[in-house]
Image: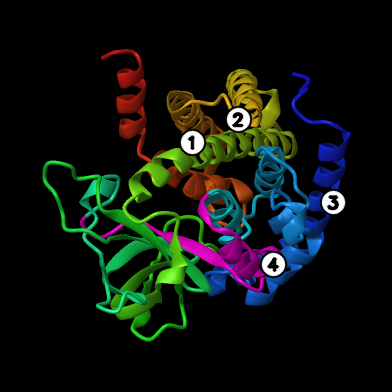
Amino acid sequence: MRRTVYNEDHEAFRSTIRDFIAKEVVPVYESWEAQGHPPRAFYNKLGELGVFGIEVPEEYGGAGETGFKYQAIVTEEVARAGVSLGSSGVHTGLVLPYLLEYANEEQKQRWLPGFISGDLMTAIAMTEPGAGSDLAGITTTAKLSEDGTHYVLNGSKTFITGGVLADLVLVVARTAPYDPANRRAGLSILCVDTTSEGYSVGRKLQKIGLRTSDTAELAFSDVKVPVEDLLGEEGRAFGYLTHNLVQERLAIAVGGYAAAAAAVTFALQYVKDRKVFGQAVAEFQNTKFTLADCKSQVTAMQAVVDQALELYQSGDLTVADAAEAKLFCTETASVVIDKCLQLHGGYGYILEYPIARLYTDNRVFRIYGGTSEVMKTIIAKSMGL
């Protein structure tokens, strides 16, 4: 189905990204998987390409574009190639909206140039061992010093994407005592320099998918964070997090669609080449029906994603809209990718085939950014239930 969501500038950018991935990522991707993340210098290459600065205002060295379409194109091209770009998606898709929306002028001047170049890689630390989707249950504390010059940060975080290589981490911490009557109050975001004394990276977590994305445990032991590195206002973090979850969930929906579309392409190529019982797998009716079904589901996902991108561009994508898009695209992607892997037979289980990576990488889409169950709760609430 013809798409109208992208213009000529978008498609020119797509061509640039596609060539870059083919030259800089695909030939070395296996070594990235073995290492668990790309070389640190790779992020500088993305910076040189302009990927990190697309949505950054021109006065800070960016391109000043608005919306999410350019990031969506990167996501689509990464899936098309059957690879990933480490933690770069968190850098631009999750952290940047916080910096653009809540950082003051001094902070933007200090952080955004390095953000754009890749010299300052970022991550965001919300999840704790005892607090996953329940952000109001965060126990990491940040107490203001007696002289009011800094916070003293203590606690731990887990499942932090980009946590190994990050230079600056946005840490959600409790800056006021826990109030059972208002669990969401008292949370703040501190931007923590990873070279700070008392800051440590624990285990690099071994995942079943997204193996080039470094995911780590973080610990804070009396880490001093200057008050100048408080992001936004003290005690307002829960509202900030809720606001930015719309874009995060849109990004995940795009990822689900892109992975499913890539899976169909990989399966189509495979069944045309693979022969069993003297004929191409593509010639069997079951193959044709399976791929036709998958293609129709991908087309439906594309329609949802494209409408969501347009609504986000105009500022009209609601929390419930984003939840619906994420739920539909991630759940449907799981079905489509599973069917496409099945068409590969035993080779679908072998990691040298992109479909195997898509299968394992995609599984987390139904978990992070809010589980499918949380999405259903949000949608039901929007229906008055």
Task: Identify the residue position indicated by label 4 in the image.
Answer: 113
Quote the CA–CA distance across marks 3 and 4: 22 Å
Residue labelled with disc 1: 246
Residue 61: percent from the left, percent from the top?
76, 61
Q: Residue furthest left?
A: 180
Q: Which label's residue is closer to the chain start, 3 or 4?
A: 3
Would residue 126 be counted in the magenta stretch? yes
Residue furthest to the bottom in view is 197
Label located before the other in sequence (4 or 1): 4
- Whole-angstrom CA distance, mark 4 to mark 1, is 26 Å
Kind of residue sitting beneath label 1? Val
Q: Say above or below: 68 vs 384.
A: below
Q: CA distance from mark 1 to mark 3?
A: 28 Å
x and y, in percent, of residue 40 in the image: 63, 75
Q: Which residue is mark 3?
A: 16
Question: Tag 3, which secondary structure?
Answer: helix
